[in-house]
Amino acid sequence: MDHSPNQPAGGSLNVAVDRLDRALEALEARVRALQGGEPLPAFTGPGSNEEYERVLAELEEARVSNAELAAAASAAHAALGAAAANIRQLVSGVA
C-alpha cells in the first residue's frame, strides 16, 4: 500500500473509519426517516443529486411494494384461515 510520507498508515485508517462512521450514521438516519414516513433530509453528500433522487425513487418503490406485499400476505392469511375452518367443519361433520 502506498502512503504519503506525512501520513502514517494508521492515520489513513482512522480517517477512513471516521468517514465510514459518519456515512453509516447518515444512512441509519435516512432509513429511520423512511420507516417512519418522514421526509428524508436534503441531499448534502458527495455524488450527484440525480443519483440521490434515483435512490429515493427506488426506496419509495420499495416502500410501496412492501405495503402491497403486506396486504397480499394479510389476504392470504385470511384465506388460509377460512380454508382451515372449512376443513375443520368438514372433518367434524364426517366424524
Image (cartoon, rainbow, N blue to C red):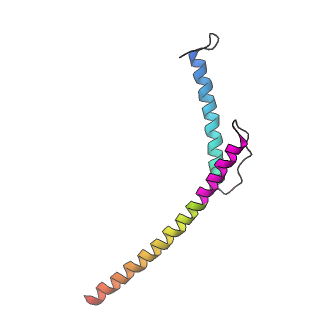
Position of residue 16 in the picture relative to residue 91 (left or right) = right
Image point (62%, 10%), residue name: 5
- Decide which of 81, 64 is in the foreground and name it: 64
Name the quadrant of the C terminus: bottom left
Image point (62%, 53%), residue name: 59
Position of residue 37 in the picture relative to residue 10 (left or right) = right
What percent of the width, then of the height, locates residue 79?
44, 76
- Decide which of 6, 52 is in the foreground and name it: 52
Q: Is residue 95 above or below residue 62?
A: below
Q: Quadrant of residue 67?
A: bottom right
Report the number of discs. 0
Q: Is residue 4 above or below residue 23?
A: above
Q: Is residue 56 magenta?
A: yes
In the rendered image, the residue lying farthest to the top is 5
What percent of the width, then of the height, locates residue 70?
53, 65
What percent of the width, then of the height, locates residue 12?
60, 20
Q: Which residues are magenta?
A: 35-63
Q: Is residue 10 above or below residue 69?
A: above
Image point (62%, 29%), residue name: 18
Q: Quadrant of residue 26?
A: top right
Q: Is residue 37 magenta?
A: yes
In the rendered image, the residue lying farthest to the front is 50
